[in-house]
Image (tube, rainbow, N blue to C red):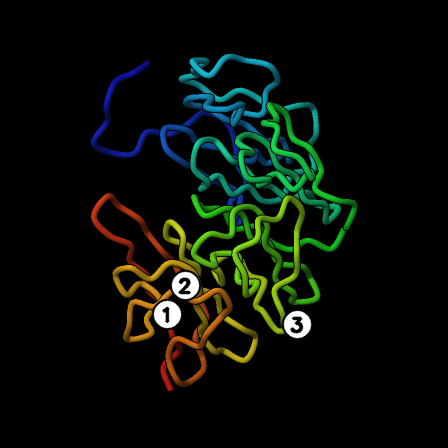
Amino acid sequence: DRVSYSSPVQIPGTWKTHKGAIGCGQEYAFAIRSNGKLWAWGKNDNGGFGVGNQPSNYRRSSPVQIGPNSTWKTINAGGGYGLQLATKTDGTLWAWGFNDNGQLGQNDRTNKSSPVQVGSDTTWANVYNANSGPMATKTDNTLWSWGNSQQGRLGLNDNTKRSSPTQIPGTNWKNDVDSVGSANYSWHAIKTDGTWWSWGENNVGQLGQNNRTEYSSPRQVYSGTQWYAVAGVSSKVGKTFMALRLKN
């Protein structure tokens, strides 16, 4: 139905409860059932549902299954215009939906209405999604980016677009679900030594550098260590970040 609710309403079925098992974007949501299958509901911008060739005005007010696979591990549906990223239990990385700047990692710019594998690696740990494009970490604590690089948002020290994952320098990035965050075209991330870093757009000081200068490669945000989680949120009037730190 299309009835508004002011308190939580249970969605039928049993669902995974680990971090990364649910994801949502503008007017759509995803969740992984306890059997490892991925489901979606809401609207279908640019094939973002992942259920095949359906029109953009395709809507579902109850969950619809995405393909037959039962090995989905995490889903991140925070990208704009219907860009989705997910990992499977075998360590593979998958993407679908909007692809105007190569965000799907397929070396092209064609939208995909069903999940497609990104490369052939089986060591992906977590995915991070935003209007600025995707990021992903591997089990070896490396951080990778691709898509549009305006404002230096890819963290690769240039403004060159990439249509396949490219490693951001360093091998000591945390690969937890909540160790990387974005707000529009800015990124923050935490390293395994507990330091906090940022790069990209900085028009309202969202990088935490005491200035409004854009940076195309990671810069440490704040002295000290023991930072362990970061999150960002965007709105029409601003971009805000926060991070959590263990008490000394």
Residue that label 3 marks? 171
Q: Are marks 3 and 2 in contact (CB under 8 Å)?
A: no
- Give the secondary structure at mark 1: strand
- Give the secondary structure at mark 2: strand
Q: Between marks 2 and 1, how big is the CA–CA gap? A: 6 Å
Q: Between marks 1 and 3, how big is the CA–CA gap? A: 22 Å
Q: Position of residue 60 (x, y in %)?
A: 44, 16
Q: Position of residue 66 (x, y in %)?
A: 60, 24
Residue sitting at 40 percent across and 52 percent down? 185
Q: For the residues carrying marks 3 and 2, which lies nearer the camera in this image?
A: 3
Q: Quadrant of residue 5?
A: top left
Find the residue positioned furthest to the front: 159
Q: Position of residue 97 (x, y in %)?
A: 55, 30
- Mark 2: amino acid: Val
- Give the secondary structure at mark 3: loop
Left or right: 188 as drawn, with respect to 114: left
Q: Between marks 3 and 2, how big is the CA–CA gap? A: 19 Å
- Mark 1: amino acid: Leu
Q: Which badge, 1 or 3, comes first in the chain's sequence?
A: 3
Mark 2 surroundings within 10 Å by alpha-carbon count, few (fewer than 14), some (14 through 19), many (20 or more):
many
Q: Please determine whether, in this image, residue 147 is positioned above or below residue 29.
A: below
Q: Which badge, 3 or 2, comes first in the chain's sequence?
A: 3
Residue sitting at 50 percent across and 24 percent down? 46
Tag on residue 230? Answer: 2
Depth order, front residue of 34/51: 51
